[in-house]
Amino acid sequence: MKRFIVILAVFALSIQVYGQKQAPLQKLRVLYVGGSANWEAAYFVGKPDELKADVAQRMSSFESMLKRYFTEVKVVDASTYNQSLSDQYDVTVMDGTPKAINPRQNITDASGKLTKIIPAAYLTEDFNKPMLFIGELGEKMGRSIGLKLDWYCLCLDADAHNMRKDHQIFKGPFPVKMTMVTKPTPEDAFHYEYFLGKKTPETLPMWKVQTKGYITDKNFRIGMVARPWGFEDSPDAEFISSGVCQKTLDAVALGRHGNFFHWGFAASPEFMTEEAQVVLANSIAYISKFNGKGVIARKYLDRRATREYLKERKYLVTKAAYEVRLASEEKFAKQMLAEKATAEAKKANGETLDQTAQMALNYKASPSQSYESFLKGRYSDLFDKFGTDEAAYARYFDENKDYFYSEDEMYKINIDEDVKSLGIPYYDKKILDKAIGMLESGNDVAKGKRILNRYTLVNFDTTAQWRAWFDKYKSKMFFTETGGYYFMIDTYDKTVPGNQYKKPGVQKVSYNKIQTGKTSHENAVAVATGMVDLGNNKKEIVIKFKVHSGYHMYANVAKEDPYIVTEVKINLPAGYRKVGELRMPSFNYFNDKGTTIYENEIMFVQEVSGDGKGEAVCSVSYQCCDSQICFPPVIGDKYKVEIN
């Protein structure tokens, strides 16, 4: 009897303690759409049953957590989802990839040249129901509709920092406890100090979100951060928190754009802290308030240049930037030549070489680049004007910082001479007032029309209509760079003129399947395959990559880094066999962790022997990055090579 009373007392106490910790259930209908795993694909190679079980376990984990906070929870697999299902719920939590309503399209011309890329569409632009994305789902499902939740880097680990602790998600409706621990600043943040504008702190107060992360737990699912530049240049978007990643300290780990919430951390509740589970529940409650709001400014071009881009352009032209790069490359060359010498000695002794030693044998030190060559490679458009005059470059960027604008080309930035001639920044609404005044006075009307056409999404027949529109809405006007360099109106009312986008352009890609074509910021890697006849029934299959200046692919990836290594696989037709190993190119330094990169033009060569006609299939995987962002990885793209 005494034991029973003690049990009752403990039970009553547990109820009391639980009641103190958690507010009543929120009256929200939540739809969870699953299908993702807790671990990366590499973890499940050859283990399909384990993958299936892990996906089911993750879905169960989310279901249990959501039912602790909300009155109604429905769990479905992404394969059964369509956007009309969200109409029945207050919030949809997306954690799986549904079937696309329009698949990705690669448009080629008659010669096989890729001329257009149309991203897959999963939602229509008029979708205005609250939705929370887990991990990289915001990038995947939001690209076609112009969301700012784009792919800056799939490199988010387990801790948050630089959060806005006064934001509603850290307050309620469920009470939040945030345990802050001071930890070393992520190493990669120091590479981007020029964005910060001040000394990077050695340590940061951090908040643990996940109990596992890809850095400490190999193959654990990696989270995603969105680009910070211009994220808040429209009133429909807000930055909430950054996190430990390999990019800038303001990379967006938690944020909102319109009716969409980006929860960039990738773990399921099973691998989240209790504190983070509460904040996730609050985030769901928070985004529910944006039902019917939709999106105002749309980011159709994810790598559009902004004013923040000028900071990088200004820094990279300096001798300091050149010397940092040179020192890193020299240090790496010394290290790799030592490793190559060791590998050569082992090979001479008949020892078995591991993969690292095999790669070291392929290394060739690149000649040191002069400051002049450094500038020519990165600033070919300005080098003819300024040569190696570092101060001249700085003046150029400073004097024109209010007159740069970007059109529909990735990282393409120009000086608007029309705006500069008036001395008014392009982002100041006074420029519209001035341009309309030019129409009214009949003074330089052509210039006035160019400015109005360039920076607005309206087109009126008369000057009076322009003036009436401006006077009526100027108090609600805002300027968005990421949204297209337009003045727009802070309203969700679709009848108000000013927010109706022109048909979004598609990415232009220069690519040739037969011969390596030109590269650009839009298409930073061009791939070509071909065959060289060596005679005597011997041939070489060649896979050539051309990497745009300033970009790189990965030769080797340290276990601490999240990137995708470059890989080439070749399947031969009947009657042919491989002669020796795949010959791999030399590589360059990337970081002290051991990650190495390919730059410029590289070739993989496989000698084969045999006779007859056939078709070899080359499968390539790689990830291309520059100093700011990484493109989504290419996995298993196939190229066919005729052998005869």
Image (spheres, helix red, strand yellow):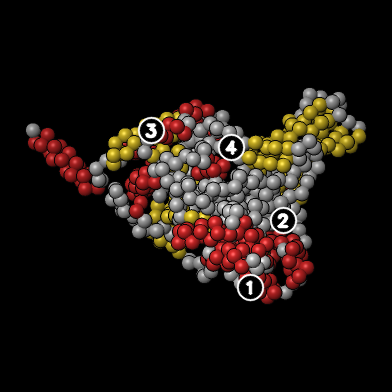
Q: Quadrant of residue 335?
A: bottom right
Front in this rendered view, residue 427 or 20: 427
Upstream in sequence: badge 4 or badge 3: 3
* Distance in Å between CA atoms under marks 1 and 3: 54 Å
Which type of secondary structure does the marked residue at label 2 adopt?
loop
Residue type at the position of mark 1? Glu
Please state the horizontal and vertical placement of residue 45, each as a whole percent of the image: 56, 32
Position of residue 511 measured from the top left corner of the image (x, y, whole percent): 74, 43
Q: Kindly report the distance in space between the C-alpha atoms of the residues bearing marks 4 and 3.
A: 25 Å
Nearer to the camera, 28 or 93 = 28
Q: Amino acid at mark 4?
A: Ala
Tell which of 40 and 170 is nearer to you: 170
Q: Which image quarter holds the C terminus?
A: top right
Q: Name above or below for residue 37 compared with residue 428.
A: above
Judged left or right of residue 75, residue 421 is: right
SS for tag 3? helix
**Circle 3 sits on which residue?**
88
- Residue type at tag 2: Ser
Identify the residue position indicated by label 2 in the image. 549
Q: Visible in this render: residue 595?
A: no
Type of amino acid at the residue the image marks with label 3: Gln
- Image disc number at residue 120: 4
Residue 588's label in the rendered image is none
Badge 2: few (under 14), some or many (20 or more) residues near its Cα, within 10 Å? some
Task: Report how far apart the C-alphas of labels 3 and 2 lie in the structure.
Answer: 49 Å
Q: Are marks 1 and 3 in contact (CB under 8 Å)?
A: no
Position above or below: 297 against 130: below
Q: Which residue is mark 1?
A: 399
- Mark 3 or mark 1, which is nearer the start of the sequence? 3
Q: Residue furthest right?
A: 535
